[in-house]
Image: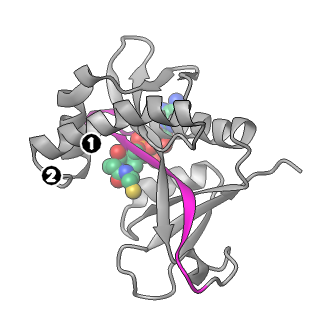
């Protein structure tokens, strides 16, 4: 997937040299080793590097995380990406009541805590939404998070997403979902 640029940010593919910063990002944004120890986060980073090239070669959906870099000083401040979300979305009003799990294109975002509160996540996510609608021609895009992740839900709202809560307690990992429909006719 091509590099995207916004007023303040560059959204570029990860490279192998980002491995230490990527591990630090996951640890600081989600909690120490919540994505696993160093061997696992390195594997994930390598997946993102390779997946970017592989999805291009296969003409497939660019499901991988990308680096968010601040233009003014070149600092890697976080990650944003498309993720394949497999869930019983039919439990939610916006979907069609399908009884089985379906796959939706989800948006992932995370910033180093020292960069929260500057609008960077929303700016990066907006660029990804534009790419999703204008270039991939997706019908809709989703974002999922826990009910108590108010900062992530606030990003969803800034993007104009409709916020839905899973009315059922199960599965426990499907909680709050933001849904944005492609406005183009
Ligand atoms: C979710 C997350 C990315 C949100 O980051 P964030 O910085 O709060 O979100 P935004 O980039 O949209 O920034 C919005 C804030 O910047 C402020 N802001 C400052 N300057 C701004 C500007 N120039 N433009 C826009 N907003 C600006 C806004 O007023 C808002 O402030 P508030 O938090 O006081 O309401 C961050 O909390 C995070 O990384 N969390 C951990 C990872 C995570 O949970 N990811 C979701 C996975 S499910």
Left or right: residue 83 versus residue 58 is: left
| Secondary structure at numbered mark 2 | loop
The local secondary structure at tag 1 comes to helix
Q: Can residue 112 be seen here?
A: no
Query: How far across and down, in percent of the image, does residue 87 sit?
Result: 48, 72
141 and 75: which one is in front?
141
Residue 35 within the segment the image draws in magenta: no
Q: Which image quadrant is residue 129 in?
A: top right
In the rendering, which numbered label is found on residue 7? none
**Spatial separation of the CA atoms under disc 2 and disc 1:** 10 Å
Q: Quadrant of the N terminus?
A: top right
Residue appearing at x 18%, y 55% in the figure: 34
Q: Is residue 123 above or below residue 133?
A: above
Q: Is residue 24 above or below residue 16?
A: below
Horizontal side, residue 117 vs residue 58: left or right:
left
- In the depicted view, which residue is nearer to us: 111 or 41? 41
Q: Quadrant of ligand 1?
A: top left
Q: Which residues are drawn in magenta?
A: 99-119
Reading the image, the residue beneath label 2 is: 36
Q: Is residue 96 left or right of residue 6?
A: right
Spot occupied by residue 44 in the image (x, y as percentages of width and height): 27, 42
Identify which residue, 6 or 57, lies in the foreground.
57
Q: Could you say which quadrant of the image residue 28 lies in? A: top left
Residue placed furthest toward the front: 58
CB within 8 Å, label 2 to label 1: yes
Q: Which residue is mark 1?
A: 44
Mark 2 or 1 closer to N-term? 2
Q: Residue at x 11, y 41 (%)?
A: 38
């Amino acid at each position: 997937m091509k590099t995207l640029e916004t007023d303040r940010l560059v959204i570029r593919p990860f490279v192998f040299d980002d491995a230490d910063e990527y591990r630090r990002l996951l640890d600081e944004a989600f909690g120490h080793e919540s994505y696993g120890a160093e061997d696992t986060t390195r594997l994930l980073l390598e997946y993102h590097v390779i997946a970017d090239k592989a999805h291009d070669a296969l003409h497939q959906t660019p499901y991988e995380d990308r680096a968010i870099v601040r233009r003014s000083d070149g600092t890697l401040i976080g990650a944003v990406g498309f993720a394949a979300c497999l869930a019983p979305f039919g439990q939610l009003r916006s979907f069609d009541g399908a009884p089985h799990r379906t796959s939706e294109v989800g948006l992932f975002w995370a910033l180093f805590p020292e960069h929260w509160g500057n609008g960077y996540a929303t700016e990066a996510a907006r660029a990804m939404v534009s790419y999703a609608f204008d270039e991939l021609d997706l019908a809709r895009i989703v974002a999922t998070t826990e009910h108590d992740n108010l900062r992530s839900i606030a990003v969803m709202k800034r993007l104009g997403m409709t916020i839905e809560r899973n009315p059922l307690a199960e599965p426990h990992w499907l909680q709050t979902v933001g849904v944005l429909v492609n406005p183009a006719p």
